Each structure stands twice: as structure tokens, then as C-alpha cells.
Image (cartoon, rainbow, N blue to C red):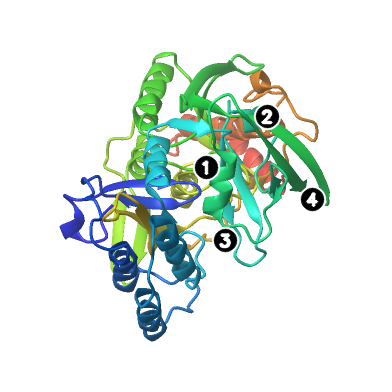
Amino acid sequence: MKIKNSLKKNFIISATAFSGIFFNNFAEATVLNNSYKEVIDHVWQIVYRDFLDSNGEFQKSSWIELRKEFLSKTYSDSDEAYDAIRDMLSNLNDSYTRFLDPKEFNQMRIDTSGELTGVGIQILKDKESDDLIIVSPIEGTPAYEAGIKANDKILSIDDNSTKGMNIEDAVKLIRGQRGTKVKLEILRGSKSFFKVLLREKIQIKSVSSKVNQTKNGLLIGYIRIKQFNANASKETRDAINDLEKKGVAGYVLDLRSNPGGLLESSIDISRFFINKGIIVSTLSKDGLKEIKRGNGQALTNKPLVVLVNEGSASASEIVSGAIKDNKRGKLIGKKTFGKGLVQSMRTLVDGSGLTVTVAKYLTPNGTDINKSGIVPDIEVNMNSNPILQKEIGTRKDYQYKAGEKELLNIIKRKNQISQFDPETKNLKAFLDINKDSQAFSFN
């Protein structure tokens, strides 16, 4: 996706859950030699030129006054300059427009490559409540294994209260040397508790797949995408090709607790299932609309259901929205997270980085899902008692079980329609189709 054609050679499109969708500039950053004000002004210029205000509060005249204020001060070191940048950005009231120091910026690049260091959570700062909220734990990480869930709130980190803490400081406290521990105080609903997590460096395999057999012997292709990292598209393609060879009758695509990842990966994966039609569109601050469509090269046209939950965010919502709006399949589970803003990631003059909101994305029907999420076609709660990791994607998994049931209904209706020939007196097939349609409408 390109906001402007001129950006095509300079930016690579990507998306992550806690920062949304990025255009990454991988050019080498020059060293800041003269003044710390240079990086402050660099940030100011980017916001002035490109920022999309989703809240309707941004005034350029006030932003111009802020420039005068921050450039009139003296900064003795990078920490002072970086604090000033964060203070300046706080006036935007946009939790996704963020400054990253060189170390954080480098870590962001590592994250999108599929390699994570830490405990395996994506977090954001809720501007209205001032809470630090977990978008989703990543499967297979210490946070996931400890039972951390999407929408948990972090009250303290190693006994440091998170009240008033910005997201950068929280990330610094949570991350640390591999093999060390961090203690998080979690609020879930009205109850708080502590979790001690071991920091690890984790290589994430983004896609897993298998064949599930129904009670009547039908083969179902199950694909779970944990994150849309650099490997997800190829891994998903390989999974579909393998499952097609095994003769599956339909697919369950599991995007639960998937916090996002590379945008191009989400578009590619949508195209594996959607032959034609709009995948996603973006609307820039200047009203420029960019549309991505199916390319006529879908890998399968077999029946499909998609599992989603509160932790399905960003790129996961692009795929979910595309499948739902194109009527390509049914969404099963809980309402998704609601991350529909587009960010551009820029390299600054001293090797630090900035993510700035530059557009919003819309589902194929033109729906803005930011903060509202995507409502599934069939709402199903997850098991009230936690299930084992090996039980995810089996009939012990309530949401999967509901998804498989709906998939079988779709397969049955499709088979009946293919059996009915309107030019013959195939009365039995006609009655069977109508009987099932009536029963389905009441369920």
C-alpha cells in the first residue's frame, strides 16, 4: 500500500499490533553532530506535514507555537531531547504516534522480522483511562504460558506503579536481559494479581496447520496464524498447498490473539482465499484513497470460517474484515480489538524513530473499525476454564467446535446446491435445500 506513489521506492509497508500499520524507511541514519534540536525539529516537521488527527483536535497554529517553545530551550544530552519529544507528542492525544529511541527503534525492526526479546506481550496506552493495556500475549511466550490475556491492565512493573507512566518507560522496565525476571501486577475485571515472568529471546513460527477429521470422516484444514511477520505469507501458502493435496473439504483459519504484523503479509494471505474484490482501503489526511484488491490467484475456493477474539488486532482485522465483507466466509468468536489507524515509521537523524498516524484503513464495505472492532457473524465465548495449548483447534476448544459446526453447515449447503439441477425435476434436492435454509434461519 502506498499513501503516495513517490513513496514507493523508499518505504516498505508493515503493521504491528501495538503500533498499527507502518511504512518503514531502512535508509542509514546519519549521526547528529550539531544540536539535539535537530531531531526535535525533525519530529515536529513530520507531524506538521503528515499527521492524521483521528480525534479532530489537532490545530496547526497550536503546533507551530509548540515548535517555538521546544526549540527555544537548551538540551544537554539525548535523554533531555527525547523527553522533550515525548512531551511534545503528548499534545496530539494519539497513543499510536510515538517516539522510539535508537534501541527501541531497532527492537521494532527485530519484532517485525519475527524475533522477539522480552516476555511476549504487546501493550498500548489508553489515553482516556491512562491505563497500560495488553493488546495480546503472543502464543508460546512466557506471558502466554502464564495466562496473560488480551485487555488485561498492567498496574505495576517490578513494584513500580504504571499510573502516569508512558509506554516507552513501561517497555524499558518489561524488557531486559535474557534469563532475568520481571514482576507484573495485573488487573483483570475487578481482581488484581501478580505474575513473575522470565525474559526470553523467542523465535516465532508464525503459522501452524493440521488436518482435523470430523465424526463423519470429513477432512478439515486448520490453519493458525500467530503473527503476520515476514514469514507468515510463505508459511500460509505452504500450509494451504499441503492441505489441498490432502483433500480437505474446507478451512478453519484461526486468528485469535494475533496482534498483527506486516501489512503486505495480511494482504497476501487475504488473496490466498479471496480471488476478486476489495481487500482493504486506506484514507489519508488529504483524502487520498488507496485500494488493495484480490489478484485473481486465490489458492482455494473451499468453504471457510475464521476464528477471532478480543486479541485479534490490526493486520488480523484486515484479513477478517476482507473475508466478512466479501462474504467469503463466516467469522466465529468474539469482537476483535479495534485497531484501524495507519502509521508511518520514520527514521530520524540520530538513528531514533517515529511512528506517526497518517491514515486510517477501512474494510471493503467502507467500515471504520477503529475502537469498535469487527463483530463476528456468530458470537461464541471461549472455554470458561483454560484449555491446554495442545487442545487449541480441537473439539475441546469451544470456539473451534462452533467454527467447525458452521463450516460443516456451509459445506452441506454448497453440496446440496451443486446437486440440484434447475432444468430437471430434482424435487428431493430442492426440498432438502429449502428445508436446511429454513432451519438455519432460525438458528
- Point out the tag, 4 or 3, that comes first from the N-terminus: 4
- Counting from the top left corner in percent of width and height, residue 182 is at 65, 35
- Point out the tag, 2 or 4, that comes first from the N-terminus: 4
Q: In this figure, which residue is indicated by the disc labeled 3?
A: 371
Asked which secondary structure carries label 4, the reply is loop
Give the number of the mark in front: 3 or 2: 3
Asked which secondary structure carries label 3, the reply is loop
- Counting from the top left corner in percent of width and height, residue 160 is at 69, 49
The answer to whether residue 392 is seen in the rendering is yes
- Point out the tag, 1 or 4, that comes first from the N-terminus: 4
Whether residues under marks 2 and 4 lie with C-beta atoms below 8 angstroms apart, the answer is no
Q: In this figure, which residue is indicated by the disc labeled 4?
A: 189
| Mark 4 crowdedness (10 Å alpha carbons): few <14, some 14-19, many ≥20 | few
Quadrant for residue 429, please give it: top right
Residue at the outermost front position: 76
Identity of the residue drawn at 44% across and 13% down? 246
Q: Quadrant of the C terminus?
A: top right
Q: In this figure, which residue is indicated by the disc labeled 1?
A: 259
Q: How far is disc 1 from disc 4 in space, using C-alphas?
A: 21 Å
Q: In this figure, which residue is indicated by the disc labeled 2?
A: 401
- Point out the tag, 1 or 3, that comes first from the N-terminus: 1
**Mark drawn on residue 187:** none
